[in-house]
Image (cartoon, rainbow, N blue to C red):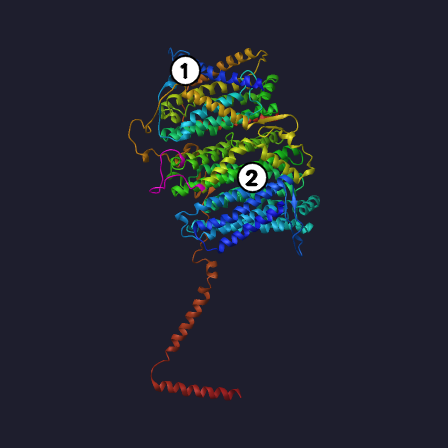
Amino acid sequence: MGALTCYGWALAFLLVGALVTFFAGLRTRRLGGLALMFAIPGCGLALLAAVSVFLRGTVSTDPLFTVPGIGAVLLVRLDPLSAFFLAIISVVCFLAILYSYRYMDIPWFADLSLAGYYAPFLLFTCATMTVVGMVDMFFFFIAWEFMTLSSYALVIFDRKRKERLRAGFKYFLIMHIATGLMFLGALVIYSFGKSFTFDGLRVTLQAMMETHPATVHFALICFFLGFATKAGVLPFGDWLPDAYPAAPSPAAAAFSGTMSKLGVYGLVRVFYEILPASNYSRTYGLVIALFGTLSIFVGTMTAMMQEDSKRLLSFHVIGQVGYMLLGVGLGVYFLPKEPNLALVALAAGLFHLLNNAIYKSSLFLNAGSIFYKAGTRNLNEIGGLSRLMPVTAATAVVASLSIAGIPPFNGFSSKWLLYECSVFGGARMPIFMGLGIIAIFISAVTLASFLKFFGASFFGKFRIPQAQAAKGDVPASMQVPQLVLSGLCVFLGLAPLLPLRLLYTSLLDIRPQLGVAGFAELFSGSVSSIRLSFGDGVVATWNPAWIALALLGFCLLAWGIMRSGGASRRTVPSWYCGEPHSDHETHFPAHGFYQPFKQFFRVRIGKYEWEGVYLSFKYPSIRLREDNWLTRLVSVDRWFFYPVVRGFYRLLVWFSGSHVGIPHVYLTWAIVGVLAAIALVFSLH
Amino acid sequence: MSQNVLLGVINVLLVLLLSPLLEGTIRKLKAFVHSRVGPPLYQPYLDLLKLLGKEEVECEGNALYRWSPVVAFAAVLGVALLTPMGLAPPLDSAGEVIVFVYLITLSGVAVMASGIGSGSPYGVVGSGREMMLILTVEPILAIALIAVAVKAGSMKLSDIVAYQLSHPYSLSMLLVTFSLFLAVLAQLAKLPFDIVEAETEIMEGPFVEQSGPRLALFKWSFYAKELIFASLLVTIFFPWPRIGTPALAILVNLVKVAIMLLLVGVIDSVNPRLRIDQAIRFYGALIFVAFAGLAFAIVGS
């Protein structure tokens, strides 16, 4: 079966699944099972399609459908880059749906119909998969819009709280402004070249760059704004910390694993594939890298201040997307002059994207597991959960160390490449050195933030707001996705060359004429070891397998030394200087972490407060005063309806004065009336 | 390959066996400054031996708390494999300066896991301080090492040492050495930056619930860190003279390390402890010195 057949069937399964789950009328777990029955073949076939593309190369269909008049063609093409995203989407979405099977069972969602959850979820999966297969901007936007709408349905699914509806509205509004901008950009280019396909746009741009520089800039800015907003890059990603926590945890995991990443996908498509290497690339590479670093800094610093687990993770989505943009920006910037460095940077950014999709989904699922057991997202109210849920605790620690970039987990490998690229890029353009240093600093902030996350929730004294939680860890169907994801964290950490080779070849596949060195020359290593060179000599080395082996050996040595004295062991309660203290008194809540450090980043001026470095203020609510002219103009009641009604009423009151109750008066009125009528008739003739 | 293994064994043995002796020297020096006689030079060995035989009294922490000393010890020994100690760094083909920085952070993570995992408020406070110190010191470490790497045109420590050997001192190196030296003080938990343990204040912070062999591992890893950081500083910033004989090279390196650590000891014994916010402010200012060094390195002076 060819890749396209698999892809088509996958989309069909998911689409039909969305319809069936919507109308099935089943409740709770049964509906989850039904959704899984469609998700398993759908995601499995999509993964198969991706693997087939990796093995056999790009596949594309003939035009399936043409929109008459505008010349947009429905054309599916799966190149290795699409396949890369397709693989991520299929794995993450499948694991999230599997996780939902039991997660959506909690009493919190009991009075909501799950059809409103599974149907949009399957539609969302289908739409994201469709987005990566489209090579025509027109149909790309249609798929994109389906993705936005279905994710909107997921954001507002839990509509018991008003702020979630508000978050959903904000999401809806900002997304549509962004999509509108992107479409505007595409239309502007279309108006010159009459083609919506990526190749057509590329040819048009090439021709326009000489003749219409301002128009090209306008279109590119539109594209940048649109995709950056979807990716959650600050300051355009302000919707993200509201919308992601509002969605149920598995949905948030799928969003952060796939939807945010598609923003980066769009940027790569536009600025790497469509935009020819030129001075424009340099400008926009710098812009992308700068906005990326802004997101890294502001997003992560703000995340450190958060005490709500999902909000904390959402700010990290912003921060981590910044790392990817740093890589993509570096790549786009150096594309015209230093293609070797450019491709390594692009591959590093996309490798970070892959890693981030894995550990960030895992973390959202971990937060969901905490909610499942403890019934709260507030990190101040929980503690010591590792005793209750050891598997979740272990996976959360692995994912946290990965996101913090601690070797030998996967986050380190990609961050390491990004640092190398920014250092060696910085030697050619010093500003990138500064951006790289900020990225290194923020990596430590990420560690701090996740130390707080898992320290407050899993370590310390056992503490849970619900009166009593059920014994044992979360159910197996919730453990498996977390275990798979943290297993991937370890595996990709130890074998970074595997995905890097795929990414490098898929990037080369898009732009074969760049004239860069082959993979073996730049990365020259086996499965595990990277020996990085940018053309002249090995400049950096990283071999996770050896380091991991050495660490393991030293762990054994340390254990041997520890046991060498034959010391006996005794477990005692914690020691509080000899005084008895209750658990409540010795609890160290998440709020207390890093207070002195946080003080350096907290500013308040009037009603504007910088939460960390993130400006947080209440949006002004529009309320006009009573005597405002606009209010008066708008309230038709006041100046038209009520005066007219009152006048009519007064007229009636006055007229009712004639109702005196004396027969002679009525008779007189009648005679007068007849006379008047006769006079009228005669005067008319 | 076999040569690398030999180098690795030499480095690990050096670190394991000689670091307590250096610690003993520092203690002797501190005693001299305080006008005391002080413990004998071999006292740290006795401390470790005694702790290894003592009963382990552990609180009801989780697995990470129990395994943290092992991880800290292993991470520090892993760093020892990346550090040049008179000879070439043994695992040069497996990691360079950024790996170095992050493996050191891994040992910091283990210290913090010990504090937070114990559930004692003293431990959590100590861990929080450790994290804040890492937040401020790690960038300086990274900037300093990157500045040297930029000059050498390679991130590999062997290339950096080779470059430094053949090039004279420059302004950027002066700034970088200064900032790196001060950053190392915090990494080694020496006064005035002995804020994490602060025995008189929070009772050794992260180690409050560690005892017996596990405390011994932590202490040993700290002694080892002293040797490693001092070695890194002197081989990168004072690599002269070039010595051909391996045994002599190791010996000369050790002498330089001892001198460096004596300087650290003097600073340690004449300074009071800073508060954590003062330390953050101090390093916040120092980071600009490091940045200046990096800027000079980029422009090539």
Using the rendered view, name the quadrant where residue B195 is placed. top left
- The x, y position of residue A571, in whole percent, is 34, 27
Q: Nearer the viewer, residue A567 or A164?
A: A567
Chain of residue at mark 1: B
Q: Horizontal placement of B118 versus A503: left or right?
A: left
Closer to viewer: mark 2 or mark 1 = 1
Answer above or below: position of B90 versus A391.
Answer: above
Q: Chain of mark 2?
A: A
* Residue B6, position as x, y percentages in the image: 55, 17
Say what amino acid the circle numbered 2 marks: Phe
Q: Is residue A596 above or below residue A42?
A: above
Q: Position of residue B155 (x, y in %)?
A: 58, 25
Span colored in magenta: A456-476
Comparing A400 with A217, the one in front is A400
Q: Residue furthest front?
A: A1
Residue at point 35%, 87% (across, down) = A664
Tag on residue B44? Answer: 1
